[in-house]
């Protein structure tokens, strides 16, 4: 027993207690540099090739996103109708994986070039969080919408006209039995989850801690897209991406696609706004870190101290 106690004592001295995994960002000594706020307007970007390269990356990524996901939707519905059995197709789970998996690999491929937004709602949320300039945000949104339109048009060219029109061109709409309010709510909450995940996955503290595993940032973003689709496909077909909804609606171009199209813009942009406010104000407490706020709170503290100290 005495020898065992010595072994325990030596082991305790040799292997000192370490901080629990995932709590390193709570320490006072920062091992990261907090990102500054992007300027609202940055005209110098317009003369930089990297600016246009990033826009092209967003165009290609959104093109591929629409191409893969709408074809997956068409294939799912077609195989389900031809076999008359839900077990013969990938099901809703397969469609959700198609969307989530595509976002995962596209974000991984384009994050170092454009940030891997592939979604006007994500771009809008990052604009509100002052992560990008208005110039870049507008350019990204235009390129994303153009890429979505091109991707949806290629799908229409590949699919037979009969099945393409039968399945609504992969356009988003509020499903039968659900109200417009339900569809709008599903889009708001779904986009909130996505944009909040983007903010969290790209946070400076997390990037410093997980820099040795670069795949970790795209993984939760893709997984968030998967989960949101799994939950809301029965309600709206899951938009949470205005470019995806716009591309499919323009190419299909019928009353079916345009009837509730506003939901797939208002919902995602509202959800992105709420996510930006929550992350930047509540989680990061950016307004409370400003010099003006600290000065005012310091003066108030001195005032109360003098009043109650007497």
Image (tube, rainbow, N blue to C red):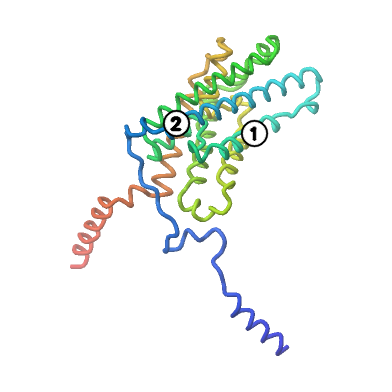
Characterize the local packing of mark 2: few (<14), some (14-19) or many (20 or more) Cα atoms within 10 angstroms. Answer: many
148 sits left or right of 83 in the view: left
Look at mark 2 in the image and give the residue it sits on: 270
Say which quarter of the image contains residue 152. Answer: top right
Q: Where the N terminus falls, by quadrant?
A: bottom right
Q: Dot 1: what SS?
A: helix
Q: Looking at this view, is 237 or 33 the one in front?
A: 33
Residue 15 in percent (x, y) is at: 60, 75
Q: Dot 2: what SS?
A: helix
What number is the disc on residue 89?
none
Residue 126 in percent (x, y) is at: 43, 37
Q: CA distance from mark 2 to mark 1?
A: 21 Å
Q: Residue at x 52, y 34 (%)?
A: 189
Residue extending furthest toward the bottom: 2
Q: Residue at x 48, y 43 (%)?
A: 199
Query: Does label 2 or label 1 sit earlier along the sequence?
Result: 1
284 sits left or right of 295 in the view: right
Look at mark 1 in the image and give the residue it sits on: 230
Q: Are marks 2 and 1 in contact (CB under 8 Å)?
A: no
Q: Looking at this view, is 212 or 170 the one in front?
A: 212
Q: Where the C terminus falls, by quadrant?
A: bottom left
């Amino acid at each position: 027993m005495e020898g065992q106690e010595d072994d325990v004592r030596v082991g305790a001295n040799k292997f000192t207690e370490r901080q629990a995994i995932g709590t390193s960002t709570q320490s006072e000594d920062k091992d990261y540099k907090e990102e500054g706020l992007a300027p609202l307007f940055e005209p110098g970007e317009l003369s930089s090739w990297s600016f246009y390269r990033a826009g092209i990356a967003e165009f290609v990524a959104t093109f591929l996103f629409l191409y893969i996901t709408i074809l997956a939707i068409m294939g799912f519905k077609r195989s389900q109708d031809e076999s008359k059995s839900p077990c013969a197709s990938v099901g809703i789970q397969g469609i959700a994986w198609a969307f989530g998996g595509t976002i995962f690999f596209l974000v991984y491929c384009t994050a170092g070039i454009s940030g891997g937004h592939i979604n006007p709602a994500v771009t809008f949320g990052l604009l509100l969080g002052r992560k990008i300039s208005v110039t870049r945000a507008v350019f990204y949104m235009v390129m994303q919408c153009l890429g979505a339109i091109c991707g949806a048009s290629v799908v229409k060219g590949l699919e037979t006209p009969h099945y393409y029109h039968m399945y609504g061109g992969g356009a988003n709409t509020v499903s039968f039995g659900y109200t417009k309010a339900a569809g709008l709510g599903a889009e708001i909450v779904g986009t909130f989850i996505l944009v909040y995940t983007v903010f969290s996955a790209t946070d400076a503290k997390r990037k410093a801690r997980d820099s040795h595993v670069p795949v970790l940032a795209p993984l939760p973003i893709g997984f968030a897209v998967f989960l949101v689709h799994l939950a809301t496909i029965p309600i709206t077909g899951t938009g949470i991406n205005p470019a995806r909804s716009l591309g499919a609606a323009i190419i299909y171009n019928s009353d079916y696609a345009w009837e509730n199209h506003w939901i797939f813009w208002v919902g995602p942009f509202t959800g992105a706004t709420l996510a930006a406010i929550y992350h930047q104000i509540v989680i990061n407490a950016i307004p409370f870190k400003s010099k003006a706020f600290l000065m005012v709170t310091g003066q108030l503290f001195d005032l109360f101290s003098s009043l109650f100290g007497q």
